[in-house]
Amino acid sequence: MNRLSTKTVRFLTKKGLKISFAESCTGGLLSSSITSISGSSKVFNIGLITYSNNSKINILKVPKKIITKYGAVSYETCLWMLNGLRRITKANIYLSITGIAGPDGGSKEKPVGLVYIGIIKGNKQLIKKYLFKKKNRIYIQRSTVNKALNLILSFAK
């Protein structure tokens, strides 16, 4: 993760881009991976840990009906998290993460390891769905961060 974080910070610095995050299942691990790199203050704007449904609703303004209808771990919630982040902070790139890191909390429809990562840059937007097979919490969180960092690098070019 550290090499990828360094690469991401250098890339964003070179491009003169600022980034903001809204994290759920990663609990700040993505923000930490960026801020652990010297010079990250040039690119890192804000990292919100909107872990609970209430924080998604109250801070990011995800409508309660979206969470009720689709669940906190869904394409729709991930999209609303992105848009909420965009409303409350100024950056060039916005990224949101919601998922089930386990080992509990999964269901047949939404198993442990299901993660959505959303990214917006300008008028380009993408939400990716991942299903990590290994049901280990730390593995899922770290894998999600790696996917997010790779997504930043590929999406922001």
Image (cartoon, rainbow, N blue to C red):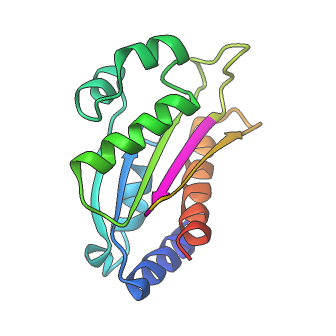
Residue 102: in magenta span: no
Horizontal side of residue 28 vs 99, given as left or right: left
Q: Quadrant of the C terminus?
A: bottom right
**In the picture, residue 91 is in which quadrant?**
bottom left
Q: Visible in this render: residue 23? A: no
Give percent across and percent down for residue 55: 28, 28
Image side of residue 25 versus residue 21, left or right: right
Nearest the eye: 83 or 7: 83
Q: Position of residue 136 (x, y in %)?
A: 65, 36
Q: Residue at x 28, y 30 (%)?
A: 61
16 above or below 107? Answer: below
Q: Which residues are magenta?
A: 115-122
Between 58 and 3, which is closer to the camera in this rendering?
58
Q: Note whether residue 16 is visible.
A: yes
Answer left or right for 112 relative to 4: right
Residue shown at 49% from the left, 74% from the top: 8
Image: 108 above or below 12? above
Q: Residue furthest front?
A: 123
Front-most of 38 and 121?
121
Residue 100: x, y in percent?
Answer: 57, 29
How would you classify the magenta stretch by its main secondary structure? strand
Please provide percent x and percent y for residue 43: 32, 73
Q: Residue drawn at (31%, 67%), measured in percent from left and top? A: 44
Count of marks placed on residues: 0
